Amino acid sequence: MNELLRKEITLGAETIVVKVGTRVVTGANGHLDDVRIAQLAEQLNELVSQGRRVVLVSSGAVGAGMDQLGLSERPRDLAQLQAVAAVGQAKLIETYDRTFRVHGRHAAQVLLTAQDLDDRASYLNVRNTLLSLLEFKTIPIINENDTVAVEELMTTFGDNDRLAALVTNLLGAQLLVMLSDIDGLYDGDPQDESTSRISIVKELDDEIRGYAAGAQHESGKGGMISKLNASEIVTSAGENVIIASGHQDNVLGRIFQGDDVGTLFVAQDKSLNSRMRWLKYSAQPRGRLQVDEGALRAIRDNGSSLLPIGITHVEGDFDKGGVVEICDPEGNAFARGLSNYNAEAVSRIQGVQSDKIFEILGRQPYEEVIHRDNMTLSGADLRRRSEEQESGESRK
């Protein structure tokens, strides 16, 4: 059964995002491993030759820069770290392009910050650029633009696992393959002989997350917890993820033969459209709307729009059409959406009936503050509503 599921998923994956971690593309000395990159290029070329569209998200720029500059330790100063990344990115893309040219293909460098995927117009522009590159049969190589991305300015993705997940959703890719130095998720410490690799995860629950605690690594930003977070982003949008070791021979070839390689995380929900993927995962909220219990139940359980009468508190400075989080009475975000009114207007009409909007604002273009078609629930609340609906149907 597991083998059939794997073959079904990999056979149907026409667009694939492959993410490689720092330990996959570097050797024990932290320098780029040309042999391993060449092997990876050969496997990616084979996938493209099969008619698939392949995008690569690659770490390794800082390590490559340290190699080029003769540094033995990773800089701690932000400006120096960004400078090293700039030097390393040039080396990284040159190495990939050289290896792809052996197979008659070209590498295409695409550097992103979180800001690029925050703005809807920019988001679509990035998507269209990537699709055009794929039409040329090139292999886009994506990395975070470490030279300009600053965490304090909310322009950083945090790590390339999350970046890979967002790119997967951006393209609507059917499969994300994350290659690291561990061959999947284990039910305990991978170094313990009594633990076993988990072949398939059908629900990313607290028990599964608990298994990731013993699988963290020191180098790079992303560990197993980061990969599980990325997997949740992808699977909750209706696509699949495989975490496997990039050190295994022909790992991509084996994965797409349907072999029992790594850990497969199965899609949890129906596939979301591009707009909802952007709203749910890439857009940065500009404000928060706290609601009462009645509005919480209406939105979460019945899929209703958010009316002004259910709003109890407004935070932030957002414009009409801005992305806002919707929070329960305790302040926990359970949804997000596009506001029909700016923050000042919402503050004036909060807690009132919709038919009073005109009296307060002198206009009433919308009855709802957020229409249900412009709203998406968090993954946990989506699953809860689905489970409650299934439970209710079973009692009928």
Image: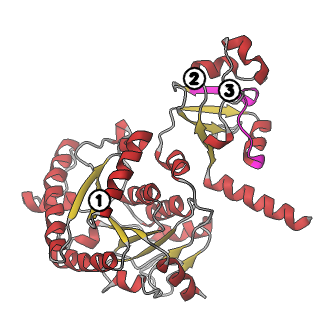
- For mark 1, give the secondary structure: helix
Magenta residues?
301-315
In the rendered image, residue 213, in percent from the top left (x then y), is placed at: 49, 67
* Amino acid bearing label 1: Leu
Side of 22 where 1 appears, left or right:
right
Q: Nearer the viewer, mark 2 or mark 3?
A: 3
- Residue beneath the point at 45% across and 77% down: 184
Residue sitting at x 48%, y 80%: 11
**Location of residue 386 in the rendering, given as x and y in whole percent from the top left corner:** 73, 59
- Which of the marked residues, 1 or 2, is nearer the chain's N terminus? 1
Mark yes or no: residue 112 visible. Answer: yes
Position of the N terminus, as image quadrant, is bottom right
Report which residue position mark 2 lands on.
Answer: 343
Q: Nearer the viewer, mark 1 or mark 2?
A: 1
User: Which residue: 43% across, 58% down?
Assistant: 171
- Give the CA distance from mark 2 to mark 3: 15 Å
| Residue occupying image coordinates x 38% and y 52% | 127
- Describe the element under mark 3 as helix, strand or loop: loop
In which quarter of the view is residue 393 placed?
Answer: bottom right
Q: Quadrant of residue 253?
A: bottom left
**Element on which disc 2 rests:** helix
Does 26 appear above or below 365? below
Q: Earlier in the sequence, mark 2 or mark 3?
A: 2
Give residue 100's position: percent from left, percent from top: 19, 72
- Residue under label 1: 133
Q: Relative to residue 85, is residue 217 drawn left or right?
A: right
Q: Is residue 264 left or right of residue 202?
A: left
Q: CA distance from mark 1 to mark 2?
A: 40 Å
Q: Which residue is mark 3?
A: 366
Q: Are marks 1 and 3 in contact (CB under 8 Å)?
A: no
